[in-house]
Amino acid sequence: TVSSSRRKCRKAHFTAHSEARRTIMSANLSKELQARHGVRSMPIRKDDEVLITRGMYKTREGKVTACFRKKFAVHVERITREKANGATVNVGIPASSLTITKLKMDKDRKAALERKNRNKGSDVAMTNVD
């Protein structure tokens, strides 16, 4: 169930289990992918290629190296910063600030795209109404 209470929504968000966090950590597809698949967004995963659309690293591109559901963060190739002691660390980027430019395809991903496709289902469903 979904509440409109800020307190309950925040609690649901931050205590969400791993599978729910997967869907929360979805990113929009690029315009070209949206046109091709008829799907607007997908849960992000390792090996997707992304474009950063918000924040300090805006317009940078790279491959996803890790998704941390616990921290709601995604690590992208070559997006790093230096710590005070000189060590380089990956910067965690929220999935909502990313646009997927290339999907890592496997059978589950393909099935999800088929399921979510908005173009194919609508015209077929309306033909046999009467």
Image (cartoon, rainbow, N blue to C red):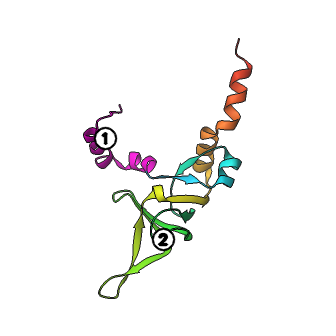
Residue 104 appearing in the image:
no
Tag 2 or tag 1, which sits nearer the N-term? 1
> Which segment did they paint magenta?
1-24
Secondary element type, mark 2: loop
Amino acid carrying label 1: it is: Cys
Whether residue 29 is situated above or below residue 10 in the rendered picture? below
Most extreme residue toward the right, as rendered? 127
**Left or right: 95 as drawn, with respect to 63:** left
Residue 116 appearing in the image:
yes
How would you rate the neighbour count of disc 2 (Cα within 10 Å): few for under 14, some for 14-19, many for 20 or more?
some
Secondary element type, mark 1: helix
Whether residue 83 is situated above or below residue 27 in the rendered picture? below
The residue tagged 1 is 9
Whether residue 46 is situated above or below residue 37 in the rendered picture? below
Chief secondary structure of the magenta portion: helix
Contact between marks 1 and 2 (CB within 8 A): the answer is no
Which disc, if any, is residue 57?
2
Q: Quadrant of the N terminus?
A: top left
Amino acid carrying label 2: it is: Tyr
**Left or right: 82 as drawn, with respect to 43:** left
How would you rate the neighbour count of disc 1 (Cα within 10 Å): few for under 14, some for 14-19, many for 20 or more?
few
Residue 40 in the image: x percent, y percent?
59, 46
Query: Does 9 lie within the magenta span?
Result: yes
Q: Residue at x 74, y 21 (%)?
A: 127
Marks 1 and 2, how far apart at CA: 29 Å
